[in-house]
Image: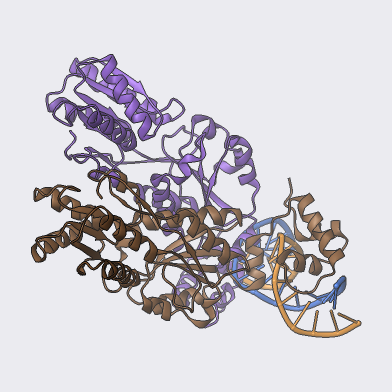
Chain colours: A brown, B purple, C blue, D orange
DNA sequence: CTGAAAGCGCTTACAG
DNA sequence: CTGAAAGCGCTTACAG
């Protein structure tokens, strides 16, 4: 079963290889008739472009690299990153390309430059990045980048409506009668941290309840510390709204260890609906996000010619036992 | 910053491009002197072969596809598969290639044939496969395949020492005084199921305690059903050894729902140490496996020229609250 | 709107 | 052991 090449398609459609290439790529002027003939041939022969040849000829690479922009390499082993890579790989497969995973390291600017001139790179999917990372995407790479997370107006972004999700969570605990709600947010370098706090403040202000925020790294240990800090500073706390499931799980553990009942004494909510959320304590109430769909959409957009400036996906509350 | 090509290397080393190619690829006869010069030039110029060009010229593809061989597509979203893909993507990145994820579907033989003649495929990493899948790897693909899981002697495999892991777990519950240990194994199509039962039987036989096995699909629901079936058939059961964390978690939930205390009344163990294992119930006692290292080793081997016939990684008991 | 031609960076017989 | 040459399958100015 010999591979079907563009020449086969051209021959079948009775046009030149140039014309066949134009309609397959969807660029340049082509007559409606030629387009029709080529498309029919493609369909009939089951033609799939050779990604390597394409990369060679165009100078543009083929594989997409998922670039982790966090200051620490820990997140490379994060289940969330794994979900993104996995979904991206699935989407990439349908396009005949592959996905590589790389940490941008301590000098993201430098690594992004390297990526920009790597002949093998077709696109870059940014995750867990800081504002700095976004700002240091080289000009000539912008057209081949998509970010999974908050937008900055420069790089197209595929994101969750975190403001709505956090707001819904805060409203949920308020609706169950809680009045002393502490927000456990992430580290300052994470753009999402600010956003979560803003949403929390808007809702609590409107409800006329106090605003209380503690910040922590995205680990269970930090979540535990944050819970203890919250109880020390505000002994009356009756709800903890965390910006990540990991933080929430750590908080629940500290609470349990300290003899505080969840949700009876203190309600706890997370964010993201990781696989472990369901197993943790009485079941973690959180917001669920279509990570797979998001990653797939970003990958497909990156590989296609059609990229939107930004796209927002829903953040939906999942009620379980913890709140 | 123009890309460094093989011609640059050849020029710097004062040899022909052919010779440069031979030493870079590590094939064919080359004088020690030529090799030294080329290697030095590669190092000095920071040369990285263009994967696309290589694929085009050699006819061999570049990307590695992680092929999920389970009868159902569900496992594509499995956290374990995500970990494998993620680790493979990291390893692939260092080789300048990417990873695609694909389900082999209901007709694995057919899909494997497609993979074998896809010009873009450099290697295939098999996961969650059946013996049938292994047997239907086309001859001309065998040299580009590695399996993550039990071996069959035909395809090189990278696997965990599951027999030792399960045995250690069974010994652990026996050591804590349990006498009525039920093995909850996976579905028949999974090669690992048989292996787990064999290990369990060897240990229980040696200890002179009864052998009791129930089989279930790898879901929490099935785990719950299995726990209930075990208690119905053997009311005295005091330990459940499951062949996966998912099964164990489901079992723990059913037990809790039925008012049975873990580990006081019934000890429970899992297998794999998924991220949620730590969060489940009193903390799941299980066996931990270096999935990232395994996947990385398999990927690197696939992409290099050096593949071993099989390689086994340790399975280590992690004691937590459930047993 | 279309086609002939050059060239992308490599590998691989082939001749020496 | 080494090098000149053909060719992998595509894209892209360029001329028409």
Q: Is residue A292 left or right of residue A55?
A: left
Quarter of image, res B135: top right
List x then y, in percent, for residue B290. Answer: 31, 47
Q: Is residue B269 left or right of residue B92?
A: left
Image point (55%, 55%), residue name: A91
Can see residue A162?
Answer: yes
List x then y, in percent, for residue A179. Answer: 19, 60
Whether residue B162 is situated above or below residue B144 in the rendered picture: above
The residue closer to the viewer here, A138 or A298, is A298
Give the mark count: 0
Q: Is residue A13 left or right of residue D3?
A: right
Image point (28%, 16%), residue name: B232
Can see residue B30?
Answer: no
Quarter of image, res B113: top right
Q: Quadrant of the C terminus of chain B?
A: top left
Whether residue A131 is situated above or below residue B273 in the rendered picture: below
List x then y, in percent, for residue C11. Answer: 61, 60
List x then y, in percent, for residue B63. Answer: 55, 56
Q: Is residue B60 left or right of residue A184?
A: right
Image point (34%, 71%), residue name: A195
The residue closer to the viewer here, A270 or A239, is A239
Quarter of image, res B8: bottom right
């Amino acid at each position: 079963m010999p591979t079907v090449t563009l020449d086969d398609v051209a021959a079948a459609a009775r046009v030149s290889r140039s014309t066949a290439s134009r309609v397959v790529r969807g660029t340049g002027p082509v007559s409606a008739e030629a387009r029709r003939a080529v498309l029919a041939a493609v369909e009939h022969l089951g033609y799939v472009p050779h990604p390597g040849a394409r990369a060679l000829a165009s100078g543009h690479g083929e594989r997409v690299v998922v670039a982790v922009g966090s200051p620490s390499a820990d997140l490379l082993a994060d289940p969330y990153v794994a979900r993104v890579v996995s979904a991206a790989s699935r989407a990439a497969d349908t396009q005949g390309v592959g996905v590589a995973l790389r940490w941008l390291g301590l000098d993201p600017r430098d690594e992004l430059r390297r990526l920009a001139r790597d002949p093998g790179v077709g696109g870059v999917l940014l995750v867990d990045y800081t504002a700095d990372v976004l700002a240091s995407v080289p000009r000539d790479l912008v057209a081949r980048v998509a970010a999974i997370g908050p937008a900055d107006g420069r790089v197209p972004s595929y994101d969750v409506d975190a403001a709505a999700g956090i707001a819904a969570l805060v409203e949920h605990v308020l609706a169950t009668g809680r009045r002393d709600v502490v927000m456990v947010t992430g580290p300052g370098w994470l753009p999402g941290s600010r956003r979560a706090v803003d949403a929390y403040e808007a809702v609590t202000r409107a409800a006329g309840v106090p605003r209380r925020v503690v910040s922590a790294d995205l680990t269970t240990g930090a979540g535990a510390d944050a819970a203890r800090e919250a109880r020390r500073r505000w002994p009356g706390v009756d709800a903890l709204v965390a910006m990540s499931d990991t933080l929430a799980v750590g908080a629940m553990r500290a609470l349990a260890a300290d003899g505080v009942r969840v949700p009876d004494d203190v309600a706890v909510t997370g964010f993201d609906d990781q696989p472990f959320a369901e197993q943790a304590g009485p079941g973690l109430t959180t917001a669920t996000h279509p990570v797979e769909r998001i990653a797939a959409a970003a990958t497909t957009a990156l590989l296609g010619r059609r990229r939107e400036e930004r796209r927002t996906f829903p953040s939906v509350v999942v009620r379980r036992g913890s709140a």
